[in-house]
Amino acid sequence: MYDVGATVWMLVTRFVTTPVACDTCGSTGKVTISGEEFTCPNCAGQRVTGTEKETIAQSVEIKRLLVKKTVDGTQIRYEGVRNGRGGVVISEGNVFATKAAAEAAIPAP
Ligand SMILES: [Zn+2]
């Protein structure tokens, strides 16, 4: 069991986004003019969401423990904030103590 304030890791699966095909910027979304970097005027640095998925480890700071007692025992879930990007609730089985442990649990593609 982890404490409030602890930083743990969870796995997040998301679709991979890639820059749109663009000859002006070589699909980087950026152009360099006189040594300064600008957003490409041709593609506006747009990215498209592909159909490929990737699973990454994300850190979560635990804000609250949600403990539920049931006839089957005690269920623990964690309410946390990941990378300052809003709340998330994870069950105990999906929490990892370290990034390495989380990454070791990523299923092979
Ligand atoms: Zn471009």
Image (cartoon, rainbow, N blue to C red):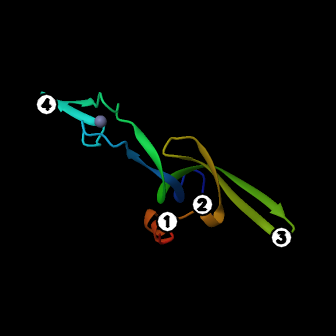
Q: Residue at point 75% right, 63% down?
A: 75
Residue that extends furthest to the right in the rendered view of this protein: 71
Q: Secondary structure at mark 4?
A: loop
Give the residue type that dot 4 points to: Gly
Gap in Å between the C-alphas at discs 2 and 1? 15 Å
Which residue is nearer to you in this view: 35 or 59? 35
- Marking on residue 2: 2
Which residue is nearer to you in this view: 24 or 99? 24
Badge nearest the viewer, 1 or 4: 4
Gap in Å between the C-alphas at discs 3 and 4? 64 Å
Residue that mark 1 sits on = 102
Badge nearest the viewer, 1 or 3: 1
Dot placed on the residue nearer the N-terminal end, 1 or 3: 3
Q: Residue at point 71% right, 61% down?
A: 76
Q: Secondary structure at mark 3?
A: loop
Residue that mark 3 sits on = 72
Badge nearest the viewer, 3 or 2: 3
Badge nearest the viewer, 3 or 4: 4
Badge nearest the viewer, 2 or 1: 1
Q: Looking at the image, in which quadrant does ligand 1 appear?
A: top left
Q: Residue at point 47% right, 64% down?
A: 98
Residue 34: quarter of image: top left
